Image: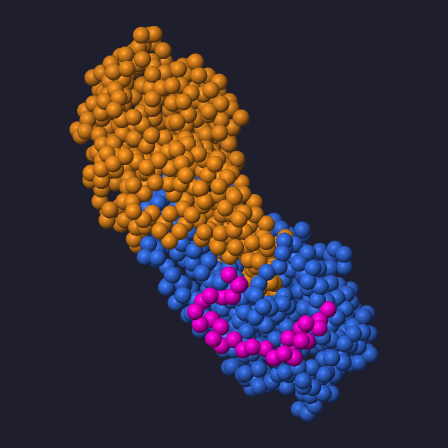
Chain colours: A orange, B blue
Amino acid sequence: MSDALAYARDHASRFRDELFEFLRIPSVSARSEHDGDTRAAAEWLAARMAAAGLESEVLDTPGHPVVLGEWRGAGDDAPTVLIYGHYDVQPPEPLELWTSPPFEPTVRDGRIYARGSADDKGQLHMHVKALESWLASTGSLPVNVVMVAEGEEEIGSPSLVPFVEARAERLACDAVVISDSAMFDEGLPSLLFSLRGLAYVEVHVRAAKGDLHSGAYGGAVANPATVLARMIATLHDDQGRIAVPGFYDRVKEWDAETRDAIRALPFDEERFRSGVGAPGLTGEAGYSTLERLWIRPTCEINGLLSGYTGEGAKTVLPAEAMAKISFRLVPDQDPKRVARLLEDHLRSVAPPSVTLEVRELHGGNPWRADPGGPLFEAAGRALEAAFGAEPVLVGEGGSIPIVGDFERILEAPALLVGFALPGCNMHAPDEWFTLDNYDRGIGALVRLYEELGTTLR
Amino acid sequence: MSDALAYARDHASRFRDELFEFLRIPSVSARSEHDGDTRAAAEWLAARMAAAGLESEVLDTPGHPVVLGEWRGAGDDAPTVLIYGHYDVQPPEPLELWTSPPFEPTVRDGRIYARGSADDKGQLHMHVKALESWLASTGSLPVNVVMVAEGEEEIGSPSLVPFVEARAERLACDAVVISDSAMFDEGLPSLLFSLRGLAYVEVHVRAAKGDLHSGAYGGAVANPATVLARMIATLHDDQGRIAVPGFYDRVKEWDAETRDAIRALPFDEERFRSGVGAPGLTGEAGYSTLERLWIRPTCEINGLLSGYTGEGAKTVLPAEAMAKISFRLVPDQDPKRVARLLEDHLRSVAPPSVTLEVRELHGGNPWRADPGGPLFEAAGRALEAAFGAEPVLVGEGGSIPIVGDFERILEAPALLVGFALPGCNMHAPDEWFTLDNYDRGIGALVRLYEELGTTLR
């Protein structure tokens, strides 16, 4: 292993240059005009996997392609690890809020600023480099490896479940390793015990066939923006609880042990608040900030659009108003059921002066780990060696829907070990990832493969 | 007068061609990138006034210029009429909803489709052509004329009041004539007895210094779009009344005679509803549709923007949400007071987890005419002769703030005689004006000058 670690150290500078190449490809999966870029990112990645010593191929799906890499040289007796990541990124807008262009990686204060640096190109690339470090320096790996990198994570992974189901034998493994999350704090390596699920819908309220003059028609024709706002106002009660009937029916209360562990974490609420620049924190009554983020469901407005939004005053009565509404879900909520409950609720409160359209955009199941097994122990040793600190168990407010699907289809447990840092602006302007965690994380992954080779055997 | 009418008939085709030239200039006053176009429209208009026989000039203001035209040949004993109009237009967006380009006038089914065809370039141009018809055919006019055409009506006329105040002597007149409104129905000429006022504000709600990941932060940091929606939901009660404290304090109830006259109009509510494509009509309880449009105040959302509004799903927790909110006002409401009441109300309901910014964009006073005097009688005769039907008295839900200002500064009554038709899409895509009303209206104005020359003497 020391050879692999030395190789990683010796080639750190080239690794970074390569990562920058990867980050320059605007692989925005949600935008059809970037389909060519998304494919280019897949092909770039396949070439890098091949250079690292894996057999790699770009496999078409009904959507964006999946990049598959394999190395089976450890033999039938050795465990097999499936490494999952995604090469697609969130849309970069609003562009004017980026300090440097989203697809021109720029280093400032030890951080790489670029869309995808943290989520997830940077972390996916670390695995490729850790594998290269083993294979180039020793010609071998402590485990068999299957890498699965998809291009649709940011749009709900519509093609990945059929892809995995159709190849369950080829993808058979003893553990699924994913690096697409954050550490609890700088220098404090972390392992995830939970992920929230997601239900995402788009709602359109229409009151007329076209925009109208707000003087000539205002007062007698419904204002769809007002109607939509009044509908949104019914989604929460005054305690910050979600007021969609039936929403909490399948929410499991968490055990006192987990809630105690969350309370024991070194969480600085004031630092969190000032870090995001919020005048004050808020949320569901009766829960702490970390509980609100990790173990309680939410309902968010992700986008609102109606009428005239440019400079100055336009006296228009809009024909239509649109909201993007998403829920973060916790075990055992079901995305499709939640989307249906929302639609039923919105229809029950919509006045007869408007028409309503509710489109389900995507969804994903929540997930919860068993932190007691050998997988977490192996990861704990690797992280402690690389970061000099024992890892903490943390929840994650975001969603990686495929995690539960992998466990179900492949019957192997998932390990989520991420190296981003709090405040890294995933999904927002000025996304960043530290150079230090990039280098140190590659070392941790080199060690993790070694530990898994021993522990899972 | 018959010579002037004959001249207008003989030159109808050229008049239309000239109007099309005027409509091609994208004089969007709200957009600074169109400042050059707005000035070009002023200069075009001044040249046309000069060609009609007026002395004309383009006078600078702190904003867009005012075009002033004068003809004093009727002598000191003759009355003076001030004709007011505006050469600026509303922004044309959303462009994709126009059947033909907004600044390329196109005739379909006897209608001129173009931004400004109805509001107000078309109607302003009719006055210029009526004046030309008199002066070119007879060398004279029955009245002295002052034309004032401004370029800031669609942004609240910020420069016009100081302009008029500074030139009160030069602009002294016996009546102010304005054509910037609609007839009640095709073939039914109309005179306005009221205009609603306007208070327009833009509200920004901010919850963080930048956009955040809705999974990583959702549930603990306020969602500004949700907060804004909840604030908007407090603006009306369940009866469609405006729930901003103090809002109705200065609203005068209208007399039974006016309400009876409104009820007597041949108004087809079902045609109105289906004409705008509304699933159903709505509004303040206890009032009819025309009352809701003409004599009752409103609160409208003119624009809403927050977060991600493009294609697909982006799981962003927006940093900010914006609403453009405007009120239509009735006598004796005051725009500045209403804007202040709104701000007070919004601050009282805003939670401590957000900051709030309220910008007053513009405002205008409501107006009410005395329909009993000689001005309305003169106009009645001119309209009846041109359209073959006695005019009806109608209200107007829109705002022309300068009307009350003219009356106050120049101490002369205003006459609002408009030739647009219901459904003409002022401020909306596919704005139109009929060729027939353009031609017939020029004839009506030729007659109106004659009637005013007699009546006001």
Dominant secondary structure of the residues highlighted in magenta in the image: loop
Q: In the visual, does B6 lie left or right of B403?
A: right
Residue A206 in picture, x, y percent from top left: 58, 51
**Quarter of the image holding residue B180?**
bottom right
Residue A18 in picture, x, y percent from top left: 35, 27
The residue stretch that appears in magenta: B238-266
Residue B59 lies, with reference to residue A283, above or below; the image says below
Q: Residue furthest left?
A: A388
State how many labels appear.
Answer: 0
Residue A413 lies, with reference to residue B61, above or below; the image says above
Residue closest to the eye, A113 or A392: A392
Residue B61 in picture, x, y percent from top left: 51, 72
Residue A186 lies, with reference to residue B115, above or below; the image says above
Residue B244 falls within the magenta-colored stretch: yes
Residue closest to the eye, A457 or A336: A336
Residue closest to the eye, A391 or A331: A331
Residue A353 falls within the magenta-colored stretch: no
Which residue appears at 57% of the width and 58% of the height?
A222
**Quarter of the image holding residue A55?**
top left
Which residue appears at 34% of the width and 24% of the height?
A414
Q: Quadrant of the C terminus of chain A?
A: top left
Evaluate whether residue B345 shows in this view. yes
Which residue appears at 78% of the width and 74% of the height?
B389
Which residue appears at 25% of the width and 24% of the height?
A372
Q: Residue furthest bottom?
A: B77
Residue closest to the eye, A101 or B409: B409
Evaluate whether residue B44 shows in this view. no
Residue A165 in picture, x, y percent from top left: 47, 20
Residue B388 lies, with reference to residue A221, above or below; the image says below
